[in-house]
Amino acid sequence: MTLELRKVGKKISNQWIVEDLSLAIADNECLALVGPSGCGKSTTLRLIAGLDPVSSGTIHINDRDVTELSPAERSVGMVFQSYALLPHLTVVENLELGLRVRGVPQRERTGKIRQVLDLVQLLDRAGSRPSELSGGQRQRVALARALLRQPEVYLLDEPMSNLDAQLREDIRPELRRLILEQKKPTIYVTHDQHEAMAMAQRIAVLHHGTIEQVDTPYNLYHNPCSLFVARFIGRPQINCLKDEAGDICAVRPEAIQFSDSGLSCKVLSREWLGNSQLLFLDTPRGLIRMMASPDEVIPESARLSWSSDHEMFFSADTGCRLNR
C-alpha cells in the first residue's frame, strides 16, 4: 500500500501555494513534512484528504487515483492539532459518532471502541468528557478516532503543537509506536524539527511550496543539498561564513573548538543548555556559534579552528551545495 503525489499543485489567485509536489510514501513508513510557516505543509495535507481541490497533478492511494474523490471516499484518517472533540460528549460518545454515521451496528461499535481505547491506553477514561482529560489524553482520543476509521492513509497535522514541551517529549515514543503499528503510509506535519527527526524515517523539507530535499534525518543534517536545508535543520543553527571565493562555508557549532592558532574571537554571550553551553563569538568573519562542555573554562579572547572535513560549501547566488 502506498500514497503517491504526482506533480501536485495548488494555486490561489494566480499564486502557487504548493507546486509540482512529487512524493511516494510506503506502508509502514512515516514521512514528516517540515518547513517555515506558510510553506505549504498543511495545504498539502488538505489536498491529500480532499478538503481542498488540486490545481494540477494527481493523488494516488494504493494505486487508485483519488484526485477527484470526496474526502469520505478516500479512506484517509486525519488528526488535527485542535483535537476537534465535542465537549458535551464523553470519550466513548465522541468515538461512536463516526461509526454510527457509517452504519456500524451497536455491538460492533462497542467492540471496536473498546479495542482502540485499549490500544491508546484510555479504557479507564471512556466515560470522561474532554474537559476532564489532559492535553495528551485528548490528543490520544483524536488519534483513536482516526484509527477507528481503519483508513489506508494517516495524516497528522501538528498533532502535538498544543501540548507543552515536557508532555510532547513524554508522549512522542507512544505516538510513534501507535502510528507504526498500523503499518500504513503516514504523513506527519510539524514545525518542530526535533519532533520530525524523532517520529519519521524520512523528512521532506518544504520551501515556498516546493520540496527542497527529501531524505533521512541523518542525511538532512550531515548532507544538506542547499543552504536553506542546512540552516533549517539543526539547532543551534549552522554557522555561515563567506569564503575567499565569495561563496558560503557552513560549519556546525559542535565542530568548532578553541585552539592555539586559527581565527581570533571574543566571547559575546553564552546560553546554558544543561549538558553543554552555547557560545556566541565575535570574529573577523562574523558571529560564530560554538558548543562547549558545561565545565569548560572560557577565555575572554581566544582562537578557533575546525577540521576541513566539517566544512560544507554553498553557492552565494543559488544556495545550492557545491562539490568541493
Image (tube, rainbow, N blue to C red):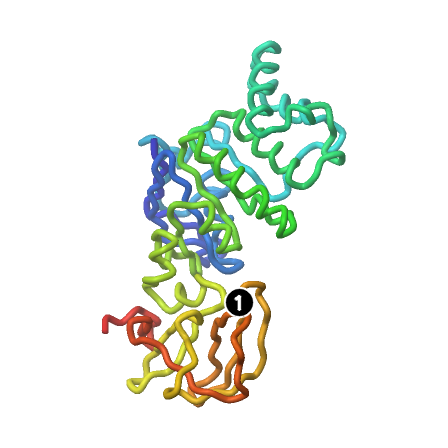
Residue 221, position as x, y percentages in the image:
38, 60
Q: Report the number of discs.
A: 1
Judge left or right: residue 155 versus residue 138: left
Q: Residue at x 53, y 67 (%)?
A: 276
**Quadrant of the frame with the N terminus:** top left
Residue 182, position as x, y percentages in the image:
44, 30
Q: What residue did someone put label 1 on? A: 276
Q: Residue at x 31, y 74 (%)?
A: 313
Q: Quadrant of residue 65?
A: top left
Q: Is residue 74 visible?
A: no
Residue 112, position as x, y percentages in the image:
56, 18
Q: Is residue 88 above or below residue 24?
A: above
Judge left or right: residue 255 versus residue 110: left
233 vs 236, nearest the viewer:
236
Q: Quadrant of residue 185?
A: top left
Residue 42, position as x, y percentages in the image:
51, 48
78 vs 179, nearest the viewer:
179
Q: Residue at x 58, y 24 (%)?
A: 118
Q: Residue at x 31, y 31 (%)?
A: 63
**Mark 1: which amino acid?**
Ser
**Quadrant of the frame with the C terminus:** bottom left
Q: Residues within 10 Å of mark 1 (few under 14, many from 20)?
A: some
Q: Is residue 68 visible?
A: yes
Secondary structure under tag 1 reads loop
